[in-house]
Structure formats: C-alpha cells, structure tokens
Image: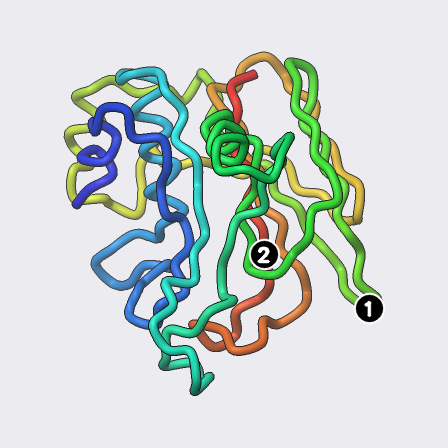
C-alpha cells in the first residue's frame, strides 16, 4: 500500500507512525520508505491536491506477548498516545484525538504544547542526564506538487518533493517554532538521548511525535 492509497481514503483521520511489533519496518528497508516519510507524503498529497484533511500520527505497541520480554517479541509498553482530553471518558478522549489534541510517544513525556496561527510551542518533561532534540518538520508552499508529480512517486520512492523536510531543529526542554507564513503544515518530533528499554529495534531512542497543524 502506498502513501497515495492511504491519502485517498475518505474520512481516515489516523495513521500508525510507530508500531512496536518486531515484524514492522517503521524505519523502512531497501524497498520501502519509513512510516514517517509515508506520513509526510500523505499530508502533502491531502493538503495540496486532495481532501485538505490532516491525518494524525499514532504510536502503538501492537502487543501480543505479555510474559516474556525481549526484542523479538511484541511486548506492551513500546508505543502509546497521550491525550489532552477535558474529561476521562471515551467521548472526550475521542473528541480530543479527532482534533489532534494528543501526541504519540515511545517514552518522551510532553509537559505541555500550544499551537496557534503564530507559533508551535513545546515544553518537555525533563529527566536527569537526558538531552532532547526537537525537529519541526513540514512542507512549504514553494515545494508543492501537482498530481502528475505525485503519480510518478507511486512506488514510494525515498526521494522527491513529496517528502517532508526539517524546517528547524532545537535542543532543550522548551522549544518554539514561529510560523513564516509559507508552510503547508508543520509537525514536531522530539528525540531523547535515552535508549529505550526493550526496544522493538536495537539502538532505538525514546521519542515523541506531535501532531501536524496548518498555520
């Protein structure tokens, strides 16, 4: 299934950007792009030549093995979502997620985040001895593409203008991206220096993904 296939699914609001099952290729392989690149391609397609609807990124552990913990087993606790809901009820949680008021994580805790038409602000819950890098990722209007260009990338090539780009990168616990006015969308990814315990893939660092918005 290609990014374009997913982009064209009507009323689909969520995309699995991280799956903790060891058989999943979140980072891609020799013939497939990463799930993050797919997410950016879906967003680009929808917001330039499609429905105009944002699709939000979800992390999940996809757990099946609950008693023996090791990398080659699908254990719980590898990925989850943190929802900014008004009430602890199914209705409130669903409503918040459908508005993008949540983030996905494999360990990083976001203390707060604010998004408006001027800026994207994030405060990270610090952990002793751990550093954090935040990447603001998106697409600017000068890089928009037409349907013909998208069609040429149907095989999910690792290159091309349909991929997102790092617009800014900042270290620290409190970071901010000020919109320039030419962005199609902006999302954020926080990567910590802390290696994840019982990762689905060796060498994995705890991370968090904050949802894209249209400035």
Distance from the alpha carbon under mark 1 to that under mark 2: 16 Å
Image location of residue 192, percent across then percent down: 67, 60
Q: Is residue 198 above or below residue 19?
A: below
Image location of residue 3, percent across then percent down: 25, 38
Considering every residue shown, the one lying at the far front of the view is 89
- The quadrant of the picture occupied by the N terminus is top left
Foreground residue among 100 and 42: 100
Please name the residue shown 62% across and 34% down the image.
87
Which of the 4 image quadrants contains residue 11? top left
Which of the 4 image quadrants contains residue 132? bottom right
- The quadrant of the picture occupied by the C terminus is top right
- Crowd around label 2: few <14 · some 14–19 · many ≥20 (10 Å): many
Q: Is 44 on the left or on the right of 7, as rendered?
A: right
Residue 129: mark in rendering: 1
Q: Is residue 102 above or below residue 20?
A: above
Contact (CB < 8 A) between labels 1 and 2?
no
Question: Which residue in the structure is indicated by mark 2?
Answer: 207
Q: Is residue 191 above or below residue 209?
A: below
Considering every residue shown, the one lying at the far bottom of the view is 68
Foreground residue among 133 and 66: 66
Please name the residue shown 32% across and 33% down the image.
42
Give the mark count: 2
Image location of residue 49, percent across then percent down: 27, 16
Foreground residue among 84 and 37: 84
Q: Earlier in the sequence, mark 1 or mark 2?
A: 1
Q: Is 38 on the left or on the right of 148, as rendered?
A: right
Q: Is 57 on the left or on the right of 101, as rendered?
A: left
Image location of residue 14, percent across then percent down: 37, 37
- Crowd around label 1: few <14 · some 14–19 · many ≥20 (10 Å): few
Dot 2 lies on which element? strand
Dot 1 lies on which element? loop
Please name the residue shown 31% across and 36% down the image.
160
């Amino acid at each position: 299934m290609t990014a374009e296939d997913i982009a064209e699914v009507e009323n689909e609001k969520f995309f699995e950007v991280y799956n903790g099952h060891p058989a999943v290729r979140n980072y891609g392989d020799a013939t497939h792009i990463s799930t993050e690149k797919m997410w950016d391609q879906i967003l680009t397609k929808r917001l330039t030549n499609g429905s105009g609807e944002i699709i939000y990124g979800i992390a999940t552990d996809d757990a099946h093995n609950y008693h023996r913990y090791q990398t080659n087993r699908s254990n719980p606790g590898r990925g989850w979502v943190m929802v900014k809901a008004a009430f602890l009820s199914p209705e409130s949680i669903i409503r918040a997620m459908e508005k993008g008021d949540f983030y996905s994580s494999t360990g990083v805790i976001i203390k707060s985040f604010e998004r408006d038409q001027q800026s994207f602000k994030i405060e990270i819950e610090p952990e002793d001895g751990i550093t954090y890098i935040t990447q603001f990722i998106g697409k600017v209007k000068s890089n928009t593409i037409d349907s013909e260009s998208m069609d040429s990338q149907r095989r999910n090539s690792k290159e091309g203008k349909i991929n997102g780009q790092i617009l800014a990168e900042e270290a620290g616990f409190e970071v901010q991206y000020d919109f320039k006015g030419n962005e199609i969308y902006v999302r954020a990814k926080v990567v910590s220096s802390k290696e994840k315990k019982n990762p689905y893939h060796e060498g994995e660092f705890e991370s968090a993904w904050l949802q894209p918005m249209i400035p």
